[in-house]
Amino acid sequence: MSQPMQAQGVYAASDDFIAGAHVNADQYAAMYADSVADPVTFWAGQARRIDWIRPFTRVKNTDFTLGQVSIKWFEDGHLNVSANCIDRHMTTRAGQTAIIWEPDDPKTPALHITYAELLENTCRMANVLKAQGVKQGDRVVIYLPMIPEAAYAMLACARLGAIHSVVFAGFSPDALANRINGCDARVVITADTAPRGGRKTALKSNADAALLNCDDRVKCLVVKHTGDQTTWVSGRDVDVKAEMAAAAPYCSYVEVGAEDPLFILYTSGSTGKPKGVVHTSGGYLVYAAMTHQMTFDYQDGDIFWCTADVGWVTGHSYIIYGPLANGATTLMFEGVPTWPDAGRFWEVCAKHKVNQFYTAPTAIRALMGQGAEWVEKHDLSSLKLLGSVGEPINPEAWNWYNTHVGKGRCPIVDTFWQTETGGHIITPLPGAIAQKPGSATKPFFGVKPVVLDPATGAEQTETATDGVLCIADSWPGQMRTLWDDHARFEEAYFSQYPGYYFTGDGCRRDADGYYWITGRVDDVINVSGHRMGTAEVESALVAHEHVAEAAVVGYPHDIKGQGIYAYVTLMNDVEPTEELRKELVKWVRTEIGPIASPDLIQWAPGLPKTRSGKIMRRILRKIAENDYGALGDTSTLADPSVVDQLIENRMNRG
Ligand code: WTA
């Protein structure tokens, strides 16, 4: 086997890897050219990777024109997503493991759930939902930890044509209630308690609290996972496991249209409340399956592990839908990387002989800090490929991942995508595109990235350039709308740069045509790979009785990528104390969830504002970054002295 190339920071897979890969460099070039020259023919061919109950005749019907944005793929085709992920594998894979479930506590045995068992459990869950009146088009909120029932529940919804909305189990009761109400769900599925890292979250009591603010008719389906005692509201609460055991083991699947919604997933935007991103059935599944196979070079029989939570899009596309559509074995992990010790990820890789491992830079940085000895203890010889997602990966983390985890022989795919894009849109294909650490490299098939001048919106035609990243045409995995708010969808993604889908990210394209994502250009921050709207944290803070005004920005954080920095102006008669600071952190955790906890709170008697009263966030960002030497033009400020005071008392002096 030849050694991986390592010239000028360019890393290619080994000759052996390339020879066995689904796509090599020549194939990528030819297929990519076809995919953008004639998307209709290209995608008609790719759509055959899934089973259609009624074949489509119309492939692509998409329009990015502001005021009439409409995205439809395979629109007259009919299918069922659950049947594609399960039933169609029954003839060849009934006894193959579909899901390996690794529990939080390593002393609890792992589960190997075969495709046959997945079918039965999904059917039983579907029958439980049906008994609660759930039918095609209804919304079901799933608020579960990383347990097999989360997969059954998602697939059961898909089976019935119901639309699921998974809410990350780390979200607070308020956040849960907003999402239940936002999509008018009549059923929420939760669990008694959720163990993670040896500690437990009281999910059912969170759901109880949330339901106080929801319609009385909402049913609460409870998975008794740990058996911990919870309150029980008779007539409203349903014991899922007991009902599943009593339900019929088969449930037929519903034929849905390609453009019928599969799920809603709430994500943070730069303004206002979280947005309910809508993905539909046909195009999403084709795209999730294809990217899973090609980006990770998934080969039949491989064990694939994506460490994300099913509460995020990464879990949807690369724990559930992509792998299962491909008949893969997918690993679902309930725990955390650092418990019982910092070797847990690697212990799980060794135990289950994982072939592809996909995680976030924040996890890599946290583990890197614990020392390489935790990796060296475990046999990682099964690994063939590593992946990264969620934020740009810094060179130190990349090198550590490559050296200690991949032993210099595993390609690293740095996959750029978003909740909105359904699957990877800029990513190396490991057999085709050599990696440069920190670059997501080249577009996936059918994706036409463009770099625009942020001010004029002009398309930058030179290869080496920078600006904002937009996509010029649709691809099947693209979101279709925002739930119940198509106007906001157009406004958020198609209005700044008319005719293009705007990602919200900045980027640089180098002389080789490689894309380097430089981070969000809007008021969205990326904390430990989780998207957070600064406006959401601000509105949580100002909801506190002592807070008059708040401005939130991101700042560089060694582990989290970005930390949350809040400038808080208190009510006139309130004393700023250490206690109050702690109380505000706790307050935000309760309002949104622990992932939104401010890292630093600076008391700000005044905020820098223009004469028209607009907060100048650019200045606040610079101060939070400890880069106050380069504040730029402050002459338009109503009171420039505010700035000196903020610099004087800045919190991040690192
Ligand atoms: C960021 C997660 C650089 C980006 C799948 C994007 C990345 C946001 C990468 C979407 C990457 C994701 N390199 N930045 N490989 N992957 N991002 O919706 O800012 O939770 O807009 O989807 O994460 O976050 P989301």
Image: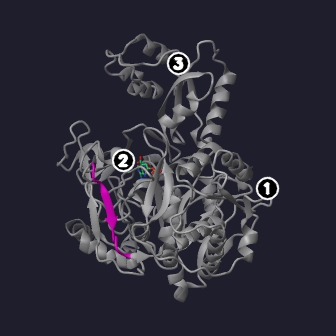
Ranked by sequence position, the earlier of labels 2 and 1 is 1
Q: Can residue 324 be spotted in the picture?
A: yes
195 in relation to 566, above or below: below
Looking at the rendered structure, the kind of residue marked 2 is Ala
Please give the label number shown on residue 487.
2
Q: Can residue 27 be spotted in the picture?
A: no
Q: Residues within 10 Å of mark 2 (few under 14, many from 20)?
A: some
Ranked by sequence position, the earlier of labels 1 and 3 is 1
For image coordinates 46% across by 19% down, the residue present is 607
Please give the label number shown on residue 604.
3
541 in relation to 524, above or below: above
Q: Nearer the viewer, residue 9 or 426?
A: 426
Where in the figure is residue 192, as x and y percent of width and height?
74, 57
Q: CA distance from mark 2 to mark 1?
A: 41 Å
Q: CA distance from mark 3 to mark 2?
A: 36 Å
Looking at the rendered structure, the kind of residue marked 3 is Ala
Do callouts 3 and 2 mark residues in contact (Cβ within 8 Å)? Answer: no
Where in the figure is residue 6, as x and y percent of width and height?
36, 58
Q: Which residue is mark 1?
A: 232
Give the magenta-colored segment's residue range.
67-77
Where in the figure is residue 564, as x and y percent of width and height?
53, 34
Q: Is residue 221 left or right of residue 537?
A: right
The answer to which image quadrant residue 377 occupies is: bottom right
